[in-house]
Image: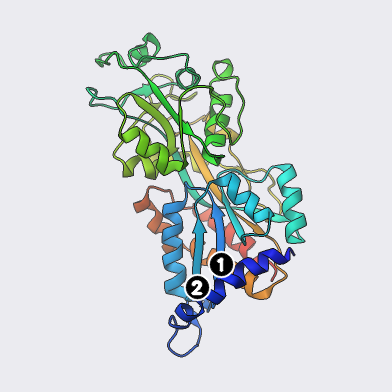
Amino acid sequence: MNTKRVGALLGIAAVASIGLAACSDDGGSTTTADGEECDVTSTIAASGATSQRNAMNVFSNEFDAQCGGQLDYNANGSGSGISEFIGGQSVFAGSDSPLKEEEATQAEQACGAPAWNLPMVFGPIAVAYKLEGVDQPLTLSPQVMAQIFKGEIKKWNDPAIAELNEGVDIPDTDIVVIFRSDESGTTDNFQKYLDAAAGDAWGNGAGKTFQGGTGQGANGNDGVASAIANADGAITYTEWSFATGQNLDIANVTTSASEDEGVELNAETVGKTIDTAQLVNEEGNDLAIDTASFYEPTEAGAYPLVMPTYEIVCSKYEDVETGQAVKQFLKVAASEDVQAQLEDEGYIPVPQEFREKLTTAIDAIEA
């Protein structure tokens, strides 16, 4: 176990000890909503995906209420979160993409045991825009999106967009692409989608860095959503809750199973997609999801841009206090009652089948 990881937890815990002591009247244990004994006397430090910032607020509040524990989560992007986890500066990382092979090797060295990808939050990616004079959602195909985000389609009334939106009076407004300037799992997922669904129209590959070669950068999901809100003609990709938080317009998306009519982003259409999810490895407790089937759905009415966000954890923590605190936090976050609260924040609760897998994996973490 990387000794920095223990120091990251215990150093913060020392600062927070007075506040933590106040969480319990008699020093006795508390009980979670699921009836499990839960008493945490330390603060855990984590960082990563901005997409789950609002979900982490829910998890943190419940962790405090149910266990007396504190979470210090820095929403600084998936890339930074993974780097800090590997570097021993945090006890887990939030990421919109599972660990790559090289990252998994580095994480195993840091943990002294394999790291696991645990999908705790499902957040749809919205293709959000602001276009004055249009009062109904526009429909976009993956091919048209690819051309927009490569800078090849430059006007909103381009014939390719108009063809998908017959009867809609679209203004001759310049398109302004807003992309994530930080290393982002949301960017990675969006580009994986374009690479799979748009075919040769994209051709720029994926990765946490935007590959479109056009537009203006902004930091974090909140940054791109705020930028769109203030710029007529702008378009971006962002986690759903940030788009709704800024009251942005959200495009309907055509799919391989819904070519004639765009699919609206809502809980029902996202639920259809999540129901098709398959794990990369069906055996074991590393629960990375193969999202390839999401991008080209076979069921009509399934929204294709769905992003699982992972808590990347050590499968074994040498420091008992650290490991137990992480396990209790994850148990609270994965519980049915807490997951249900995520709907109000623009996320989709983890389906029952996945919650059972999550519970098994969390219980298997050694401390």
User: Circle 1 is placed at which residue position?
Assistant: 44
State the mark number for residue 73.
none
The residue at the point 58 percent across, 38 percent down is 291
User: Circle 2 is placed at which residue position?
Assistant: 69
Q: Is residue 314 left or right of residue 112?
A: left
Residue 59 x, y percent position in the rendering: 45, 62
The residue at the point 51 percent across, 41 percent down is 307
Res. 364 in view: no
Mark 1: which secondary structure?
strand
In the rendered structure, which disc, 2 or 1, sits on the residue that comes first in sequence?
1
Q: Residue lying furthest bottom in this view?
A: 26
Vertical arrangement, residue 221 with respect to residue 116, above or below: above
The image's colour scheme reads rainbow
Residue 270 x, y percent position in the rendering: 43, 40
Q: Is residue 270 left or right of residue 316?
A: left
Residue 331 x, y percent position in the rendering: 54, 66
Quarter-of-image position of residue 213: top right
User: Identity of the amino acid at label 1?
Assistant: Ile
